[in-house]
Image (spheres, rainbow, N blue to C red):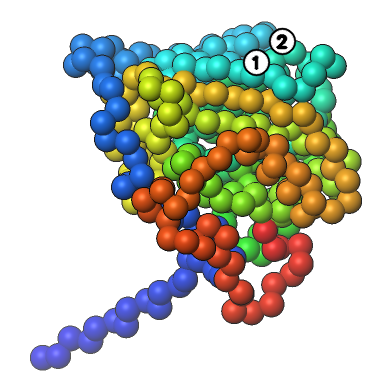
Amino acid sequence: MTTATAPLPELVATTHDWMPSSPCGTGCIDTDADTVSNTEFAMRLATVVALMATFPVANTVAKRGWRNAVQRRYARALLGCCGVELRIVDNRGTDTPGITFAEPGDGVLVVCGHVGWTDILVLAAVQPVSFVARADLIDWPILGSLARRMRVIPIDRANLRKLPAVVAQIADRISAGERIAAFPEGTTWCGRAYGNLRPALFQAAIDTDTAVQPVRLQYIGADGALSTTPAFVGDETMAQSLLRMLWSTGTTAEVVLAPVEQPGTDRRDLAARCERAVRGHVHLDFAEHGVLEPGQRNTVRQPAEPVPESCIA
């Protein structure tokens, strides 16, 4: 007797020719960084569990005017559990809202390079913001709960035609006085190399005449050199990355608040201005990176089929 076999479902491509990609992989990650003792690791793990269990209650019962402070304290506590200290440098001059991205009620688009999931905690530790983040973030352990409460704007980079709707959502929310943070590289890099800031999301600032706050975020090890310990790159799982951070120590997240950029009328020009601000005077030697081949950083592949101008990132 012959049994009929159902045909295998057709595989659907989950990428496109404009899909942001990074050549960084697990080979970029520091493997000789300092670690804590078993006792300290256990205490950190217990603290993370306690923080995640109490945060929903603390955030709910806090008075509206205190919620930003509660969220900021929890973000800083989680960073502490990951062995990360926060250092903020404000280069915006004297007419600024203090060590924050914007005054309460003032909409702003915050942009910076992307190294890993700790970037979200670092920015929230400066001032709570909502994020444009990968669509599956809400399903991640620990960060998923925070993401839902921070009202993330999900973005599916594999679905290019949904990008205009994401830009429109960002525009609506910054027009309503919200602080929205985005990572225009579109993917993570290890921190010793970086990608270009894609222009698409900057259109929201132009459409609403909203200022953009460029942020230079770097992780520095105990030896004063750039650290890749927080990098979430390649095929590493969230669990592996989380465990490495809970064991690590001696990392400083340096947040440099660059002067605010006015939107102008050209998203490519705005992205270029913000990229210069985000990179600052830091020189990264791509030839000595050990992973990147010459020319990989700025490789642009042409799309297989025409796409709307508003979709091009």
Q: Horizontal placement of 296 versus 112: left or right?
A: left
As helix, strand or loop, the secondary structure at mark 1 comes to helix
Q: Is residue 270 above or below residue 41?
A: below
- Label annotation for residue 68: 1
Nearer-the-camera pick, 54 or 185: 185
In x, y percent, where is residue 309? 76, 67
Left or right of 15? Residue 280 is right
Residue 55 is situated, as x and y percent measured from the top left of the image, at: 49, 17
Name the residue beneath numbered marker 2.
65
Residue 115 in the image: state x and y as whole percent. Answer: 49, 39
The reply to whether callout 2 and callout 1 are in contact (CB within 8 Å) is yes
Which percent across, then down, holds residue 235? 34, 51
Identify which residue is drawn at 41% across, 48% down. Answer: 289
Number of marks drawn = 2
Mark 2, residues whose alpha carbon is within 10 Å: few (<14), some, or many (≥20)? few
Q: Looking at the image, which is closer to me, 43 or 146?
A: 43
The residue under label 2 is which amino acid type? Gly
Q: Is residue 68 visible?
A: yes
Q: Residue at x 80, y 51 (%)?
A: 269
Checking the image for residue 299, the label placed there is none
Q: Quadrant of the C terminus?
A: bottom right
Is 173 rendered above or below residue 221?
A: below
Q: Which residue is at the far bottom? A: 1
Q: CA distance from mark 2 to mark 1?
A: 7 Å
- Quadrant in which the N terminus is drawn: bottom left
Residue at x-position 77% and y-position 54% = 268
